[in-house]
Image: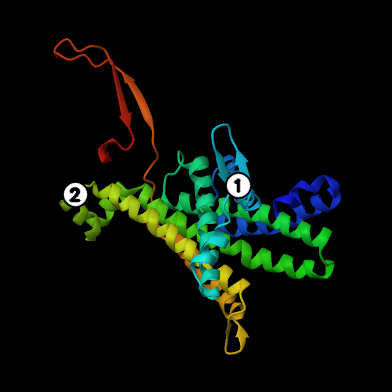
Amino acid sequence: MLSVFLQAKLYPVEFVSCILLALIPAFAWLWIFLRKHPERKAYVGLTFVFGMLSALVVLGYQASWGDTFNFVYFKVEAVDFQENLRGIVSHSVWASFLIFLSVGFMEETAKHYAVIQADKNIFESVDDVIELSIVSALGFAFLENIGYFFMLIVHGQGDDLFVTFLMRSVFVVFIHILCSGIYGAFYGMGFFAKPYMKKKIQQGKTFYIAEFFHRIFHWRPAKMFYERMVIEGLVISSVLHGIYDFILETNVTIFGKPLFIFGLPLYLVFGYWYLSELLAKKENHERFGHLVIKEEYTDKDEDTEEETPVRLKNAFEAMQ
């Protein structure tokens, strides 16, 4: 796939056409999910670009499978994990599922890392994390779509372009949105662990796992909750992504029909409903604030023994 972009200068008109085609679903889905809760435009653009860069990283890794990179004192080989999995798992169906699961894990990690690098200093609510995770997913899918459309126009059959455009614009882009949005929801709860847990405890909820590890190992409950949310979000999003790729790319059938005929509509309908619920959830819109460091300069108080010329105040000081 990465080689496709290297051919862009040979087919400039076709490449520009693919960019314009890929922009259509990107802007359409962006309007659907962000029209009611628009984020800061500068950060939306930055996150979209970072999402594109995360796709380039994944494509670059895939393009380098089997290559050996020579450094001064050592060599590094980019291993094709697909061949490793096929060698470990003898059953072809299970091997295929694990491969797609690994691809899902890799892509969800890359998209999420893009969000963290672009936006973690502006998160004020769980809703912010969800929406910006969706933007990163759109950037990732946008770059992927350019590559697929370009391959079809330049090297494939023109008759397949409409079907591919429809399939990728509706289902493939939405899968990226769904998985990233879910990961964003879990990460957002973990990111605001202390205020989130405090609010839930006031409502009568008990965090048994965090409490157990705190009593046994004296680990901080908020830190435990954060780690748990990050892991759960990554696992759920990777599994959903892997299952989607599996039912789409394999020949598994049910009632004599390809599995994707039943699976894709379910993903689209229930996925859209679930994401809409997450974005509409009142508690996800609660503003917990973001990290702010403020300096206050005060004169020496002659009636006290201590001098405090500078004090640093943190927006979350009470929660640390």
Question: Is residue 206 in sight in this rendering?
Answer: no
Q: Residue furthest top?
A: 302
| Residue that carries the numbered disc 1 in the rendered image | 57
Mark 1: give few (<14), some (14-19) or many (20+) Cα within 10 Å.
some
Kind of residue sitting beneath label 2: Phe
Q: Nearer the viewer, residue 218 or 320?
A: 218
Question: Is residue 117 in sight in this rendering?
Answer: yes
241 shown above or below 80: below
Q: Nearer the viewer, residue 34 or 79?
A: 79
Q: Residue at x 80, y 51 (%)?
A: 15
- Which quarter of the figure is the C terminus placed in? top left
Mark 2: give few (<14), some (14-19) or many (20+) Cα within 10 Å.
few
Kind of residue sitting beneath label 1: Val
Q: Residue at x 55, y 74 (%)?
A: 92
Quarter assignment of residue 265 = bottom right
Quarter assignment of residue 255 = bottom right
| Residue that carries the numbered disc 2 in the rendered image | 217
Label annotation for residue 275: none
Image coordinates for residue 18, horizontal then vertical, percent: 77, 55
312 shown above or below 24: above
173 left or right of 215? right
